[in-house]
Image (cartoon, rainbow, N blue to C red):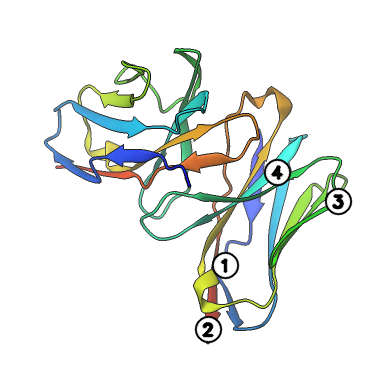
Amino acid sequence: SQKIEQNSEALNIQEGKTATLTCNYTNYSPAYLQWYRQDPGRGPVFLLLIRENEKEKRKERLKVTFDTTLKQSLFHITASQPADSATYLCAPLSRNQGGKLIFGQGTELSVKP
Amino acid sequence: EPEVTQTPSHQVTQMGQEVILRCVPISNHLYFYWYRQILGQKVEFLVSFYNNEISEKSEIFDDQFSVERPDGSNFTLKIRSTKLEDSAMYFCASSGSNYGYTFGSGTRLTVV
C-alpha cells in the first residue's frame, strides 16, 4: 500500500539556520507533491507544489526538491524565524488519485530565537 | 485572499445524536473534500465531491456519513449517529485546477 514517511521526531533549530525536512514515499508514482503548513488547531495551509518533471521549486525562503528516483522530497526553509515554527505536511499526488490528498504524519519544526 | 469558511468552530454532541458540519468553499472551485484529524494523529481523507456527486470515499466514510451541496454554495457533512470515536477536527477543503488545496479552519467535534 502507499506509504508516506516524514521525520517523525521534532526538528529544533536556531533562528537564522536552514531547516531541512524530508518526505519519503513508497508504492507511489506521484505526478505532483505538495507541502503544507499546519499550526495547532488550524487547517493545513498550502505552501508549494512541485511536479514530477521539476527538480526544484522556490518561493521566497522556501525551496522544495523532488527526486523521483529516490522517491523523496526535501523541504528547506532558509533564514528560519520563530514564526516558521509549525508542523509541515507533505502530500504526494498521483494522476489516478482523483485529487484525493494523502498526507504524511508531518514533521514538527521549532525555531528558537 | 479567498477563504474556506467552516461553522461551527466547535460542536459538542451527545453520543447517538446527528450532527451537521457546514462549509462554504471558495466560489470558483469545483472539487470539495472533507478530512478529519483525531488529536495527535495525521490528517485523514474522508470524501471528495465533484459535479454534485461523491467521487471517492475512504473506509472511514461509512453509512453513518453523508455529504451534500444543497444550494450551490454550502457543502455539508452529516454524521447520523455519532460515536465517541468520531471526536476529531473536521476540515473542509476545496480546489480548482491548480492542485493547491484551500482548507478551512476546521470544526472541533466532541462527542460525549
Relative to A35, does residue B97 appear above or below in the rendering? Answer: above
What kind of element bears circle 2?
A: strand
Q: Which residue is mark 2?
A: A112
Discs 2 and 4 share one subunit: yes
Relative to B89, does residue A106 appear above or below in the rendering? Answer: below
- Observer-nearest residue: B101 or A22? B101
- Labelled pair 3, 2 in contact (Cβ < 8 Å): no
Where's residue A54, x and y in %?
A: 84, 46
Q: First in sequence, mark 1 or 2: give its number.
A: 1
Residue that appears at 37% across and 18% down: B72
The amino acid sitting under disc 3 is: Lys
Q: Quadrant of the C terminus of chain B?
A: top left
What kind of element bears circle 3?
A: loop
| Closer mark to the observer between disc 1 and disc 2 | 2
The tally of labels here is 4
Residue that appears at 60% across and 83% down: A15
Where's residue B50, x and y in %?
A: 51, 18
Report how far apart the C-alphas of labels 1 and 3 lie in the structure: 26 Å
Q: First in sequence, mark 1 or 3: give its number.
A: 1
Q: Give residue A9's mark.
A: 1
**In which quadrant of the rendered view does residue A95 lie?**
top right
Report how far apart the C-alphas of labels 1 and 2 lie in the structure: 16 Å
